[in-house]
Image (cartoon, rainbow, N blue to C red):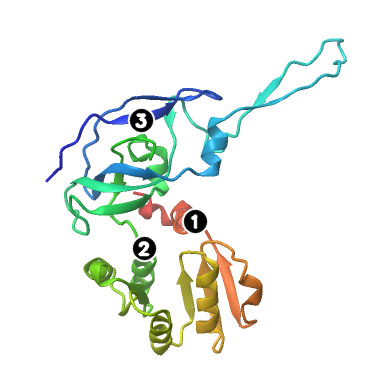
């Protein structure tokens, strides 16, 4: 099944230190486990801006050979791009077509996408285009990984996403569209916990995890530091990482890079 798809266009970076140029790119057909998305919101990573832009370093002194050094142009190219190339790793939009075997999303669903693993090297998955492709498992990875590893997983979610969340096999789902204190108490009632992953990386999230692990202690996994980190109880050990990029970038987990 597919929704109408117009001409696909992308913001091409034609070379080092050049401006992006909007031009046509093929309309991708999603393969097994893939979806096509009508891109509506693109997240601009600061690193992407550094890759695109140029900066000059001027030298006015005389060289040892008596010649004034010319301006030097430096470029931040940590991704080792092959030009022309398309930047962008995160975006959100509407599913317009699903590939064979896709069951967790349908045409018309709104999704958020972060590309990682092998997809970072393929232009059909880049976000600076109108109709990029994405892999089906959008979100829910932490629940799936830990439940498959044999842990009893308790997660939060909305009733609207219950079917999606249950496919990731959590032991319990705590519905989060309730009063703040009720949600926190429900999470506490399902404990105690050895570890908690709080994916927003916010100050409020840090405070909640501090309360939940404050009496028993445990590991606190997060996506970023918070101003509240210094107020965490001593028995709580916080660890931050770029999930799931760290996992799929490990050569030992090569089977996940698809």
> CB under 8 Å between callouts 3 and 2?
no
Chain-order first, disc 3 or disc 2: 3
> CB under 8 Å between callouts 1 and 3?
no
Identify the secondary structure beneath mark 1.
helix
- Which residue lies at the image location 19% right of the left edge and 36% below the top edge? 5
Q: In this rendering, would 12 be left or right of 111?
A: right
Chain-order first, disc 1 or disc 3: 3
Tell me residue 141's x, y (percent): 36, 63
220 vs 121: above or below:
below
Tell me residue 189's x, y (percent): 40, 89
Is residue 128 visible in this depiction of the protein? yes
Count residues near mark 1 (Cα–Cα under 10 Å), then give few for <14, some for 14-19, many for 20+.
few
Q: Closer to the camera, 2 or 77?
A: 2
Q: Mark 3 highlights which residue?
A: 10
Count residues near mark 2 (Cα–Cα under 10 Å), then give few for <14, some for 14-19, many for 20+.
few
Q: Residue furthest left?
A: 1
- Which residue lies at the image location 23% right of the left edge and 29% below the top edge? 7
Q: Mark 1 highlights which residue?
A: 246
Identify the secondary structure beneath mark 2.
helix
Q: Mark 2 highlights which residue?
A: 141
Question: Residue 170: which quarter of the image?
Answer: bottom left
Chain-order first, disc 1 or disc 2: 2
- Which residue lies at the image location 28% right of the left edge and 73% below the top edge? 169
- Disc assigned to residue 201: none
Q: CA distance from mark 1 to mark 3?
A: 28 Å
Tell me residue 58's x, y (percent): 75, 22
Q: Residue furthest top?
A: 66
Identify the secondary structure beneath mark 3.
strand
Q: Single out the mark in the foreground, 1 or 2.
A: 2
Q: Single out the mark in the foreground, 1 or 3.
A: 3
Q: CA distance from mark 3 to mark 2?
A: 29 Å
- Which residue lies at the image location 31% right of the left edge and 39% below the top edge? 132
């Amino acid at each position: 099944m597919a929704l109408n798809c117009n001409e696909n266009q992308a913001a091409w970076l034609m070379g080092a230190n050049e401006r992006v140029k909007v031009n046509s790119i093929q309309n991708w057909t999603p393969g097994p486990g893939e979806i096509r998305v009508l891109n509506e919101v693109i997240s601009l990573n600061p690193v992407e801006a550094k890759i695109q832009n140029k900066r000059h370093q001027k030298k006015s002194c005389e060289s040892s050979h008596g010649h004034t050094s010319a301006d030097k142009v430096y470029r931040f190219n940590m991704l080792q791009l092959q030009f022309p190339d398309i930047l962008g790793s995160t975006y959100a939009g509407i599913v317009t077509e699903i590939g064979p075997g896709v069951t967790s999303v349908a045409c018309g669903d709104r999704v958020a996408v972060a590309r990682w693993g092998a997809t970072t090297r393929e232009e059909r998955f880049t976000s600076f285009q109108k109709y990029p492709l994405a892999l089906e498992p959008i979100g829910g990875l932490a629940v799936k990984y830990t439940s498959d590893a044999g842990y009893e997983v308790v997660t939060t979610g909305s009733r609207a996403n219950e079917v999606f969340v249950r496919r990731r096999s959590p032991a319990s789902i705590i519905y989060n569209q309730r009063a703040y204190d009720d949600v926190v108490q429900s999470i506490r009632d399902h404990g105690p916990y050895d570890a908690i992953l709080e994916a927003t990386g916010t100050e409020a999230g840090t405070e909640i995890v501090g309360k939940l692990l404050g009496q028993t202690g445990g590991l606190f996994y997060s996506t970023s530091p918070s101003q509240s980190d210094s107020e965490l109880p001593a028995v709580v050990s916080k660890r931050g990482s770029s999930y799931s990029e760290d996992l799929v970038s490990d050569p030992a987990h090569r089977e996940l890079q698809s």
